[in-house]
Image (cartoon, rainbow, N blue to C red):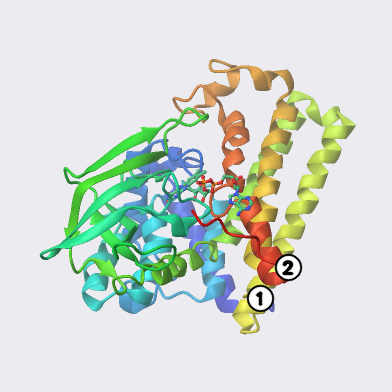
Amino acid sequence: MNPVDAADVAFRDEVRTWLADNLTGEFADLRGLGGPGREDLDFEARLRWNRHLADHGWTCVGWPAEFGGRGLTMSQQVIFHEEYARSDAPGRINHFGEELLGPTLIAFGTDQQKARFLPKIRAVEELWCQGYSEPGAGSDLANVATKAVRDGDEWVIDGQKIWTSSAQVADWIFVVCRTVPGSARHEGLSFLLVPMDQPGIEVRPIKQLTGGAEFNEVFFTGARTAADLIVGEPGDGWKVAMGLLGFERGVSTLGQQVGFERELGELIELAKTNGAYDDAILRDRLAQAKVELDVMRVNAVRGLSGVIAGSDSSAGGGAASIGKLVWANWHKRLGELAMAVLGPDALALGGSARHADGVGGDSPVDRWQKLYLFTRADTIYGGSDEVQRNILAERVLGLPREPKGTA
Ligand SMILES: Cc1cc2nc3c(=O)[nH]c(=O)nc-3n(C[C@H](O)[C@H](O)[C@H](O)COP(=O)(O)OP(=O)(O)OC[C@H]3O[C@@H](n4cnc5c(N)ncnc54)[C@H](O)[C@@H]3O)c2cc1C
């Protein structure tokens, strides 16, 4: 914080104290559970924790108060996410509703949609998932082929989504689909809100190499939703879909870095206990990781200071793409470094002493192996490395656009 603001200091104390007082009793054992790659761990208990947060006003903290949020300033939101990560509180289960759909409805939704959905997102009573990617539409999202047609006062949806995180627990899905027959690319798409619990929707889990199944295929066969559950105008879904992605990497970035710091700290501790720290090359790699993390943090704080001061020059300056490239590759390298620290032990599956602490859950891999395996995904979701580099090349450096396929 710069300069030190007394209100922010008091707020940090308030958050820290509340978390320390409440991560106790039935919630004490939840520390460290959940988060990317570990969404399958102790879901029911984490749901209770998330509702406990909601009961005490600690969900949707950045939403304006009129929509049930806490209306925190940008710096207070950062403080909240930092302290949350620092306390090792369990991973939030409401990311898609709280951080993506909620802000999108606030920006683009009707009054009825806001009144219907925002309170239940805030209370963690309804969970959401994101129906964007399809087998033929990932990086090239405009290739979406799932269709919806009007039938009286409903939309009828046919098609398939894939890699749909948390669809197995979600009550609702927001779906980008084609509502204008014969349209192509960004034209003719719409953004629909669809209930999951209906005969026209089938969720099939996809087992990942970590052993978990956090994401799914979702099949729509005559699935239905009410005609007024469209966000924006019919055919205007691209604007809404891109607006939502703009919320994807918000102020929680600094909280994520605190989480990285803790992971690195724990890896250093492990290296000290298993002897890896005596190896000068490994020590050097750990030090390098620390330096890179510090650079990341300084950059994030600089970017955020610009936003807070209203002098943000990052829009169009590629800050989001650079940030994504840097953190995703850092985290992937941390997974590789964890394997080096474990040494030959990294090759041992299930039943090793490291599973005794329970952090591997039911998975045959322990938390460090899981980190290594799951971080392969970091450079894919949220825009792959290649896509981020294309954005930087074309939109920031002004290099010629790559030719687009016509199929
Ligand atoms: C853990 C995880 C969770 C996810 N959760 C969700 C979710 O909840 N909802 C959802 O809708 N989606 C989700 N996704 C999907 C994610 O958005 C896509 O995986 C991502 O957009 C990439 O699309 P794709 O997998 O189809 O790969 P493709 O787009 O087919 O890419 C394959 C390879 O080609 C490269 N490539 C593609 N286009 C170009 C280009 N123009 N130039 C150079 N290289 C290129 C890519 O970088 C990649 O290496 C998730 C993915 C992961 C890994």
Single out the mark in the foreground, 2 or 1: 2
Residue at the disc numbered 2? 399
Local SS, label 1: helix
Position of residue 162 relative to residue 21, above or below, is above
Q: Position of residue 59 (x, y in %)?
A: 39, 62
How many callouts does the rendering have? 2
The answer to whether the residues at label 2 and label 1 have Cβ atoms under 8 Å apart is no
Position of residue 347 relative to residue 263, above or below, is above
Q: Position of residue 357 (x, y in %)?
A: 53, 26
Q: Is residue 5 visible?
A: no
x 76%, y 59%: residue: 295
Position of residue 203 relative to residue 183, above or below, is above
- Which of the 4 quarters of the picture holds residue 275? top right
Instruction: Check the picture and name the quadrant holding the N terminus.
Output: bottom right
x 18%, y 63%: residue: 150
Residues 221 and 203: in front is: 221
Local SS, label 2: loop
Between the residue at mark 2 and the residue at mark 1, the CA separation in whole angstroms equals 29 Å
Q: Is residue 120 visible?
A: yes
Amino acid type indicated by mark 2: Leu
Amino acid type indicated by mark 1: Ser
Q: Residues within 10 Å of mark 1 (few under 14, many from 20)?
A: some
Residue found farthest to the front: 406
Residue 398: numbered disc: none
Residue found farthest to the left: 152
Residue at the disc numbered 1? 305
